[in-house]
Image: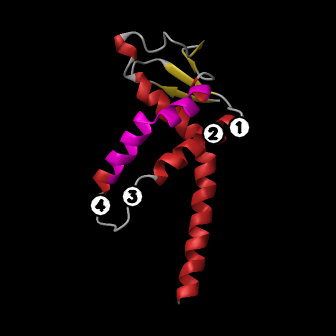
């Protein structure tokens, strides 16, 4: 169980999510990221980050895939529900909760993906040498 202090001072608790829910989130994020073009390498890093963050924030597919993951977490010993972010002072917690829940669910996939990417990149470099 991962615990995180939120901007409002409340405590977020993230437990395990079923594989199928985490995988659905990973697939949604991967599909959205595929549509962000970095073809010529000239796009500035801040612009790339803006595009990635905007895509993640407004994607209905990501929101739908993230929802079951969010419904499994607890804020101050209460499961997340409609009232969790209703108070104005709790709204600053929303993006922090989304970030923490998404990271917790995506990290195992991303570690494996980057390891395989590095391996394939090394094989390509050897083949070109």
Which is nearer the N-term, disc 3 or disc 2?
A: 2
Mark 4 to mark 2: distance in Å?
A: 29 Å
| Mark whose residue sits in front, 3 or 1 | 3
SS at circle 1: helix
Relative depth, front residue between 27 and 127: 27
Q: Which of the 4 image quadrants contains residue 40?
A: bottom left
In what element is the residue under mark 4? loop
10 Å crowding of disc 1: few (<14), some (14-19), many (20+):
few
Identify the residue position indicated by label 4 in the image. 43
Task: Give the CA separation, mark 1 to mark 4.
Answer: 35 Å
Residue range (magenta): 48-68
Who comes first in sequence, dot 1 or dot 4? 1
Cβ atoms under marks 1 and 2 closer than 8 Å: yes
Pointer 4 and pointer 2: residues touching (CB < 8 Å)? no
Residue found 41% across the figure and 53% down from its top:
36
Residue 24, disc: 2
Q: How far apart are marks 3 and 2 (CA)?
A: 23 Å
In the figure, is residue 67 to the left or right of 91?
right
Q: Overall secondary structure of the magenta stretch?
A: helix
Question: What is the CA distance from the residue labelled 3 to the residue labelled 1?
Answer: 28 Å
What's the distance in space between the residues labelled 1 and 2, CA to CA? 6 Å
Proximity of marks 3 and 4: CB atoms separated by less than 8 Å: yes
Find disc 1 in the rendering and name its residue.
20
Residue 3 image offset from top left, x and y in percent = 56, 28
x%, y% of residue 128?
A: 53, 87
Q: Does residue 41 lie above or below 13 as drawn?
A: below
- According to the image, label 3 marks what residue? 37
- Mark 4 / mark 2, whichever is N-terminal: 2
């Amino acid at each position: 169980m991962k615990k995180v202090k939120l901007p409002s001072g409340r405590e977020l608790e993230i437990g395990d999510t079923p594989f199928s829910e985490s995988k659905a989130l990973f697939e949604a994020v991967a599909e959205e990221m595929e549509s962000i073009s970095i073809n010529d390498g000239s796009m500035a890093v801040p612009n790339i980050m803006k595009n990635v963050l905007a895509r993640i924030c407004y994607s209905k597919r990501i929101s739908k895939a993230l929802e079951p993951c969010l419904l499994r977490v607890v804020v101050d010993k209460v499961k997340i529900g409609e009232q969790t972010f209703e108070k104005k002072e709790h709204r600053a917690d929303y993006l922090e909760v989304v970030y923490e829940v998404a990271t917790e669910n995506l990290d195992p996939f991303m570690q494996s993906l980057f390891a395989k990417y590095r391996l394939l990149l090394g094989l390509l470099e050897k083949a070109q040498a």
